[in-house]
Amino acid sequence: MCVLGTRFMIAYYRRCKMKANCTVYIKKDDGIAVRDADRLVAVATNFSSVVRFEVGTNVASAKSLFSVITLDWRRGHWVDIKADGEDADVAVDTLAKLIESI
């Protein structure tokens, strides 16, 4: 393989490695309240990655309290946490553990 091909593969690997996602089940009886959403946003703002929550067809930035509150955070729903950036893995893992602990 030529040097150019190797550089391309390394760049592609790095780009793919910077994405992470996880799906979490909401088990709290009354869903995610405003106080819980505020905790999620406070934790998400500590990461440099772009982090999103997806509930059904609705998508929200994890760093915007208004966006997070507008999601349908009810018991029995699944939340997809997706992140793009340098610390995407840590961001997704941390937010997934926080949602599971709420």
Image (cartoon, rainbow, N blue to C red):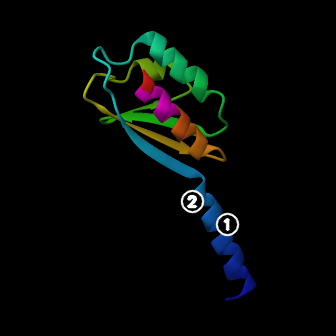
Residue 3 colored magenta? no
Residue 102 circle label: none
The x, y position of residue 69, in whole percent, is 42, 18
Residue 11 circle label: 1
Name the residue rendered at 71%, 88% in the picture: 2
The x, y position of residue 76, in whole percent, is 25, 28
Query: Most prominent secondary structure in the magenta stretch?
Result: helix
Q: Provide the secondary structure element on which disc 1 rests.
A: helix
Rendered position, 38 above or below 11: above
The residue labelled by disc 2 is 16
Name the residue rendered at 27%, 23% in the picture: 75
- Say which label, 1 or 2, has the lower sequence index: 1
- Cα separation, mark 1 vs mark 2, equals 9 Å
Which residue is outermost to the front? 101
Number of marks present in the image shown: 2
Q: Which quadrant holds the C terminus? A: top left
Relative side of 24 to 48, left or right: left
The x, y position of residue 22, in whole percent, is 43, 44
Q: Which residues are magenta?
A: 95-100
Which residue is outermost to the right? 3
Relative side of 14 to 37, left or right: right
Which residue is outermost to the left? 76
